């Protein structure tokens, strides 16, 4: 079952001048993982809550499959939901927590044996079968989140909503849970997932497509590769993957950056227009090469497998992520950087949102 937002607007306290989500048109295909990615206040959680039924749109409609659920209460929508706080009952064992949703929904007139079977199935799916008799206080944060996911899966939803489900976990647990969610996606190919996060790594790792949100609006939607290779705005370029965003002036055969002519595809942008050149740091090389620019090292950071160089060029900072260097330059050194023409994307100046 898919999800469709049809021009959905959500306003605070019904005040149309103070919107939390503005005119969202977006479709999540059946079996797809769609990540809603953006900073705090971007509208991503509001969109998820509109699907869940916790907020009502001021205008527009929400569909699950072909069913208009805009006016239905949450318990009649047949969705599973996982939030970052886990929301487990401390006085209930793991199996009781997982069964709670089934009992509350009376799903659908299930017998005690059927409920036990669904609980066991959900715990097995999330790797928590051995912990069924424990209490939440006896589990780690990652284990508690698995129980929360098991509780959502026990009702056998066709739509699973996940609201920042990993933000309370440390980096190692987060990585492990991402792998578990990816495995669940493979094992539940008919379940659509709407995944809210501000973490680009989570979105890039898990999602089939990413909807980039900012200022209550959808900025761009596409596959991770599309957003990374062909951003349509400075906001998308900087938020998905990080980028050098260099102010340039368009010439007849390329662009001018800080007095240096660079050969890139101008994409039909008129000559003498101002624009922004987007180049990913890992695509910038050190030394001689095409589109060479010269500057002074202002900072260098060792990141294990790579060094990141910050190079000042004509009052602007250019970042380069390089494989670990045996003899890296130091602060104040003059260095040459370069990049291939096909690795640069030209964005119209001033377009910070798509």
Image: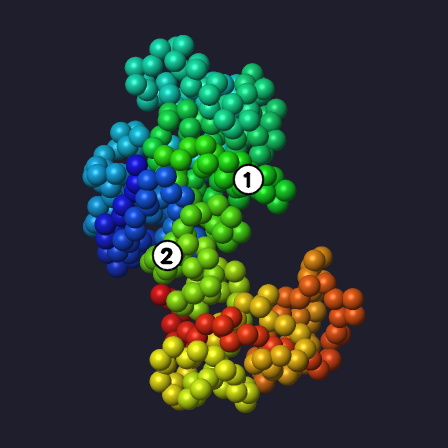
- The answer to whether residue 257 is left or right of residue 320 is left
Q: Residue furthest right?
A: 327
Task: Check the image and report above or below for 183 versus 115.
Answer: below
Identity of the residue drawn at 36% across and 81% down? 269
Packing grade of label 1 (10 A; few <14, some 14-19, many >=20) is some
Q: Residue at x 30, y 40 (%)?
A: 2
- On the image, the x and y values in percent for residue 150 come to 47, 27
Q: Is residue 212 above or below residue 189?
A: below
Question: Which residue corresponds to the image point at 63% horizontal and 66% vertical from the top-left?
Answer: 321
Q: Judge left or right: residue 124 versus residue 61.
A: right
Please say whether residue 21 is visible from this viewpoint. Answer: yes
* Relative side of 163 to 54, left or right: right
Assess whether mark 1 and mark 2 are in contact (beta carbons under 8 angstroms). Answer: no
Residue nearest the observer in this picture, 327 or 106: 327
Q: Secondary structure at mark 2?
A: strand
**Residue 220 sits in quarter:** bottom left
Quadrant containing the N terminus in the rendered view: top left
Q: Position of residue 189 (x, y in %)?
A: 40, 35
Name the residue: 57% across, 75% down.
Answer: 339
In front here: 329 or 36? Answer: 329
Q: Mark 1 highlights which residue?
A: 179
Q: CA distance from mark 2 to mark 1?
A: 23 Å
| Residue 11 in sight here | no
Q: Quadrant of the C terminus?
A: bottom left
- The circle drawn on residue 221 is 2
């Amino acid at each position: 079952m898919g999800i469709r937002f049809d021009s959905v607007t959500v306003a605070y306290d019904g005040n149309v001048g103070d919107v939390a989500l503005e005119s969202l048109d977006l479709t999540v295909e059946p079996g797809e993982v769609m990540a809603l990615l953006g900073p705090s206040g971007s509208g991503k959680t509001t969109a998820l809550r509109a699907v869940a039924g916790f907020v009502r749109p001021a205008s527009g409609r929400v569909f699950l499959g072909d069913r208009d659920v805009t006016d239905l209460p949450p318990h009649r929508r047949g969705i599973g939901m996982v939030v970052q706080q886990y929301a487990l009952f401390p006085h209930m064992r793991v199996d009781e927590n997982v069964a709670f949703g089934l009992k509350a929904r009376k799903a659908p007139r299930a017998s005690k044996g059927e409920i036990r079977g669904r609980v066991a199935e959900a715990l097995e799916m999330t790797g928590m079968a051995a912990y069924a008799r424990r209490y939440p206080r006896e589990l780690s944060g990652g284990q508690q989140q698995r129980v929360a996911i098991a509780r959502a899966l026990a009702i056998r939803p066709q739509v699973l909503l996940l609201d920042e489900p990993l933000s309370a976990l440390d980096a190692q647990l987060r990585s492990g849970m991402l792998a578990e969610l990816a495995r669940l996606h493979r094992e539940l190919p008919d379940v659509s997932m709407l995944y809210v996060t501000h973490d680009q790594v989570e979105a890039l790792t898990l999602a089939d497509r990413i909807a980039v949100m900012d200022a209550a609006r959808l900025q761009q939607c596409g596959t991770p590769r599309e957003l990374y290779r062909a951003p349509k705005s400075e906001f998308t370029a900087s938020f998905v993957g990080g980028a050098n965003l260099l102010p340039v002036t368009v010439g007849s055969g390329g662009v001018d950056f800080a007095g240096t002519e660079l050969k890139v595809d101008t994409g039909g942008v008129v000559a003498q227009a101002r624009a922004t050149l987007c180049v990913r740091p890992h695509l910038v090389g050190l030394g001689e090469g095409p589109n060479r620019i010269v500057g002074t090292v202002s900072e260098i950071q060792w990141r294990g497998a790579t060094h990141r160089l910050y190079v000042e060029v004509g009052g602007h900072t250019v970042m380069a992520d390089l494989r670990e260097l045996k003899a890296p330059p130091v602060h104040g050194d003059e260095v040459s950087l370069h990049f291939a023409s096909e690795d640069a994307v030209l964005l119209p100046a001033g377009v910070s949102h798509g």
